[in-house]
């Protein structure tokens, strides 16, 4: 699952939960659930890092505008942090056996999807996250 998709899901959860502690735990849980959903990364290594960076800035801006920067940022961090293991693996600094997150070390196996399925589902998740953020800025909730 692309990092930006994890950021979007975590931010959306953070907007709704509005609690950093609970949000971080739910963010970690969302990462595992999303990794179990058939998926694939959408970009190469550099593209993943850039998309995650710009997605994080976008959701952080929405969180500040909505007056909820801490719960949204902490929840998005919880939902994205596990993929630090993937980045370390890409860089050759961590083996699959050394990973601790259950969907990264093979304990809970991941399934690859087709590229088109991955683009459609992950785009919908990012758009849903943006919609939740914008609705919070507009004080719809
Ligand atoms: Zn992952």
Image: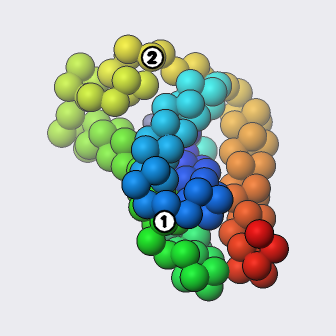
Residue 57, x across and y down, in percent? 51, 74
Looking at the rendered structure, which numbered label has been put on residue 24? Answer: none
What element does badge 1 sit on? helix
Residue 130 is situated, as x and y percent measured from the top left of the image, at: 71, 65
Query: 37 or 111, which lies in front?
Result: 37
Crowding near the residue tagged with mark 2, few <14, some 14–19, many ≥20 C-alpha atoms within 10 Å? some
Earlier sequence position, callout 2 versus callout 1: 1
Does the beta carbon of the residue at mark 2 sit less than 8 Å from ligand 1? no
Q: Quadrant of ligand 1?
A: top left
Foreground of the two, 69 or 80: 69
Instruction: State which mark lies toward you, 2 or 1.
Output: 1
Percent across and percent down for residue 117 are 76, 33
Q: Which residue is mark 1?
A: 71
At 56% from the left and 30% from the top, the residue drawn is 33
- Residue 60 is at least partly visible in this image: yes
Q: Is residue 50 visible?
A: no
Quarter placement of the N terminus: top right
Residue at image position (71%, 49%) is 125
Which quadrant does the C terminus fall into?
A: bottom right
The residue beneath circle 2 is 108
Colour scheme of the rendered structure: rainbow
Question: What residue appears at the point 63 percent right and 27 percent down from the top-left corner?
Answer: 37
| Element marked by disc 2 | loop
Please tell me which residue is depicted at 55% across the width and 63% down the height of the picture: 18
Marks 2 and 1 in Cβ contact (< 8 Å): no
52 above or below 70? above
Q: Residues within 10 Å of mark 1 (few under 14, many from 20)?
A: many
Report whether 104 appears left or right of 54: left
């Amino acid at each position: 699952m692309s990092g930006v998709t994890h950021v979007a899901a975590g931010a959306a959860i953070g907007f709704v939960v509005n609690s950093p502690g609970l949000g971080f735990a739910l963010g970690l849980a969302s990462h595992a659930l999303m990794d179990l959903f058939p998926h694939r990364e959408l970009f190469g290594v550099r593209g993943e890092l850039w998309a995650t960076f710009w997605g994080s800035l976008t959701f952080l801006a929405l969180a500040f505008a909505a007056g909820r920067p801490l719960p949204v940022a902490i929840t998005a961090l919880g939902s994205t942090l596990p993929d630090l293991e993937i980045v370390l693996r890409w860089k050759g600094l961590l083996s699959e056996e050394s990973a601790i997150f259950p969907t990264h070390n093979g304990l809970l196996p991941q399934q690859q999807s087709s590229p088109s399925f991955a683009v459609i589902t992950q785009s919908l998740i990012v758009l849903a996250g943006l919609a939740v953020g914008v609705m919070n800025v507009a004080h719809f909730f």
